[in-house]
Image (spheres, grey):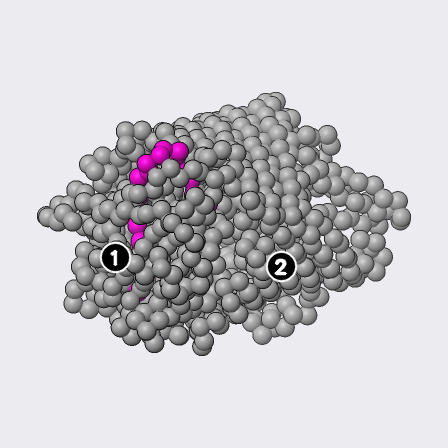
Amino acid sequence: MVFGVITLFAQPKIYTTQKLIGNAPDIDGYLDEAIWQQGLWEGKFYQNSPNNGETPSQQTSFKIYYDDDNIYVAIKSYDTKPDKIERRLSRRDGMTGDRIAIEFDSYYDKRTSFMFGVNAAGVKNDGIIVRDDGYPDLTADPIWFVKTQIVADGWQAEMKIPVSQLRFNNDDDKVWGLQIVRYFFRNQEYDTWQNVPDSLSGWVRNYGKLYGIKNLKPKKVAELAPYILGKAENYKKEEGNPFAKGREFGIDAGLDGKIGISNDFTLDIAINPDFGQVEADPSQLNLTAYETYYQEKRPFFLEGRNITSYNLGFGFTFDNLFYSRRIGRPPQGYTTLQEGEYVNIPERTKILGAIKLTGKTKKGWSLAIVESFTNNEKAQINNNGDVREESVEPYTNYFLARVQKDINKGNTIIGGIITNVYRDINSANLEFLNTTASAAGLDFQQFLNHKKHVLRVNYSQSYISGSKEAMLYQQLSSRRYYQRPDNNSVSLDTNITSLAGSSGTIQFAKEVNTGFTYGTFFTYRSSGFEANDLGYLQLASYLYGDSYIGYAITKPFSIFRRMSFESDMSYYFDWDGNVTRLYADNKGYISFRNFWNFNYHFARTFNITKNTLLRGGPAIKLPSFWEYQFSLSTNNTKKLVGTIAWWHAIHDEDSGINYELSGQINYRPINSLNISVYAKYGDYFNELQYVSEEAVGQEARYVFGSLNRETLFFALRIDFNISPEFTLQYYGSPYISGGLYNDFKRIDDPLANQYIDRFHTYEPNEISYSDANEIYSVSENANGSTDYSFYNPDFNFKQFRSNFVMRWEYRAGSAFYLVWSQSRTGIDYYGEFEYGKDIQNLFKVFPTDVLMLKFSYRFMN
C-alpha cells in the first residue's frame, strides 16, 4: 500500500483464480472438498474502520474458483472466541451480526459492482453498487446459494454464484475489480482485503484486481414467476349501502419475470403485479397545502432505482423526475352524488402491466427504460338499484428512458432522461388532469483531483398540455399560486392549454472520508416547471443556494471512535427576486469507543417571507426561529439497544413553540427474535395556522387561528425468523393527533414591519360560535350581522395500521405468503388531546381486516 501525508491512490492487490477441474463442491459450508484443502488461501486484510489501514482484530482468508456456470467462493472468518460470534437471524438484507461479503466489479468500470454477502446465521445480504459510493441497492435479490458453519477457529461461508447473476464483457482474458469485506460485529469493525485509505474518495474505483478468468461466456438470465392469490376482506357493514356488505372475497393472478435480452441488458416484466405483502405507509397528518412524500416499497420499482432516479437537487431536495408512487396511485377523479346514492371507488389504480429494461455496456453506456400501463378505474354509483359508472382515473401510459455514459476513465459522466405520461381522458370529471406531460433532462459530472472534487450540473425542461380546466388547475395549485395579487413574474391565464418550465442545478464539492469537506450548491425551478405526473415536485418558482464546510476525524482517540461536524448557510429567493428565507446551521456526529453515538443540530431560520401560507393570497412575513436537536443511542452490539431524541423550535415574537420527544428500544432476547418499539410525542403551538379564505364583497379575508396540537405515535415491530427462508413479521402502529384552535384572526397587512400589525385578532363581540352548526360567524363591525363564517377546524385524528406477514421461500426465488392486515381510522372534533379517551375511541372504530394468501413459483434457466 502507498501511505503518506496525502494518499492519491491505493496500490491494487491482485488475486488470481483458477478454473475448477472436476466435481463442483457441495454448498454446505464445511469446506471439506479437495479444492478447498489444497493450495494457499489469500489473506492479509486491513481495517477500514475504525483504525484505517491497521491490522484487523481477527484475520480473514478466502479462495475463488470458477467453471462455465458458476463462481465458487469460500471465506474463512477466524475468531479466537467463536462462542461470541453473533449469529442473528433476520429477513434477507437485514445487515446484522457478524457478516462477510464479496464484491465483483465485473464490468470493470470502477463504478459498478455486484455484492454477495451473508451473515454468520446464513442470512443473505446482496445488492448492486452503481455509483462508486459503497452503498448497495439492496432491492435486487439475485438467485445464488450460500451456507455458513461455525467451526473451532471461527466461522466460514461457502458460496455458489451463477454466472447468469453477473454482467461482464465477452473478452477471453478478463480482469475484474474485487473486494472482500468483513464486519466484525462485537468490535464494530470493518475489514477489507483491498485497503481503501480514508483520504481517498469513492469505493469501487479502489478495488483490487481479480485475474485468471479465461474464456468465461456470459449467461443470459431467464426467470418467470407466476403467482396466484386469494383474498378475503371484512369491514363494517352499512345498512342500505349495496357496496358495503361487510365481506368480500377475491382471487387474482399475475406474472413477474426477468429475461436476459443480451449479455448487457435485462428485461423485467410485471403483468398485473400485486404488492399485498408490502408494509403500509406510516400514518401522517398533513396540515399544509403540500403533498406528502412517501417512500417507495414495491420491489418492482425499487430494484434499479439508482439508475432510474433523476434527483433535480442532487439529494438536497426530494424533487425528482421519477417518483414511482405515481404509478398505481389512488384514483384522482371525483364523482357527483345525488341524495340517496351510494358510491364505490377503487382504493388503488390497477397496474395492468409494466416492463423495465436495465443494463450497462462494456463501453460505459448505462440504460434504463420503464414502461407501465394502468387501468381506467371506474366508480360504481347505485341509485335505488340502478347502477351507473363514472371514470375516476383514465387509462394512463407512463414512460421513462434514462441513459448515462462514462468517459475519460470514469472521470466524466454525462447523462439524460426523458419521461412522458399520456392519459386517455374521455370523461368531463377528469378534464382537470393533464392529457400529456413530458420532461427531459441532461446531467453532467466531472471528477477532479483524483476524484476528491466533483462538479455536477443538471438542466431539465417540462411541458404539460390539456384542457383549459387542467391548466387552470395547475396555475392555482399550491406549487405556483399564479393568482397571488403580489405575483409580478407571472399572471393567471384562463385560456392556455399548455404550460412549460425549466429546472437547473449546479454543485461543486470536495468529497472525502476524512479531513475537510466543503461545497456550494445552487438550484432553481421556474414558475411553469411541472414534474408531478411521473415525478415529485413540491414547489416551483424559486431559487435556492447553499454553501457548507465540514470536518471529519476517522481515527479513534481518547474516548472517541470518530466524529464529524458541518456548518452551512442557505438562502431562498422567489421568482420575483425577493428573499424568502435565510438559514444557518451547525451539526455534528460523535461516536464513542463504547459504541454509543451522539448527534446534535442547531439552526437559525430568519428573514422569512412565505408566498404560500395564504394559499393564493399575498406573501406574508413570519418571525425568525431557532431549532435544537439532540439524539443519543446506546451500544448496538448488545441485546438491548436504545435511542432517545429531542427536537425543539422556538419562534420569535412568541409566535410558536414546538417540541418532539422520541425514543426507540430494540430487544433481541434470542438470535431469531427481534422486538422494536418506537414512540414519538409532539407538542406544537403555531399562532398563524391557516383556516380558510372567505370574502366580504369583492375583498378576500384570510382567516387564521392559533393552533395547539399534540401528537402521539407508536410503532411495534416483531421479527421472528425460524430460518433465513422462513420468517414471521408483525407491524402495528397507532397514531393519535388532537388540534384545538383559538384566537382566530384575519390577515390585514401581511408585510407590516411589526409582527403584531400583520393581523387582527377578533374581539369577543366580533366572533360567535354555534354549537348546533359547529360554525364560527364573524361580524367585522360588531353590529350583529354576519359578514362571513367558517366551520370549526378543531380535530382529533386517530389511525391504527398493522400487518402480519409470514414468508416462506421454499425454493430459490419462489415464495409463499400469508398476510393479515388491519386498519382503523376515525376522526372527532372536540380538539383536546386526551390520550386515554382518544385511544379508546380509536379501538371502538370498526376495523377493516384483510387476509391474503399468495403463492409464487419461479422457473429459471
Quarter of the image where one finds residue 570: top left
Q: Main secondary structure of the magenta part?
A: strand
Q: Residue at x 47, y 65 (%)?
A: 90
Seen in the image, is 469 located left or right of residue 3?
right
Quarter of the image where one finds residue 233: bottom right
Q: Which residues are magenta?
A: 165-184
Count residues near mark 1 (Cα–Cα under 10 Å), then give few for <14, some for 14-19, many for 20+.
few
Residue 694 visible to an observer of this rendering: no
Residue 232, x across and y down, in percent: 73, 59
Numbered badge on residue 476: none
Seen in the image, is 782 located left or right of residue 253?
left
Q: What residue sits right under mark 2 in the picture?
A: 816
Frontmost residue, 307 versus 208 = 208
Q: Residue at x 82, y 55 (%)?
A: 241
Q: Residue at x 65, y 42 (%)?
A: 271
Using the image, determine if residue 98 lies above or below residue 546.
Answer: below
Q: Residue furthest front?
A: 22
Using the image, determine if residue 356 lies above or below residue 45.
Answer: above
Judging from the image, what secondary structure is the residue with disc 1 in? loop
Q: Amino acid at mark 1?
A: Leu
Residues at marks 1 and 2, CA–CA distance in whole angstroms = 43 Å
Residue 709, x across and y down, in percent: 51, 62
Residue 724, x across and y down, in percent: 50, 64
Q: Residue at x 65, y 70 (%)?
A: 843
Image quarter where the C terminus lies is top right
Count residues near mark 2 (Cα–Cα under 10 Å), then give few for <14, some for 14-19, many for 20+.
some
| Magenta-span inclusion, residue 174 | yes
Q: What residue sits right under mark 1 in the picture?
A: 40
Judging from the image, what secondary structure is the residue with disc 2 in? strand
Residue 554, x across and y down, in percent: 21, 57
Q: Amino acid at mark 2?
A: Phe
Kindly report which numbered mark, 1 or 2, lies closer to the viewer in this rendering. Answer: 1
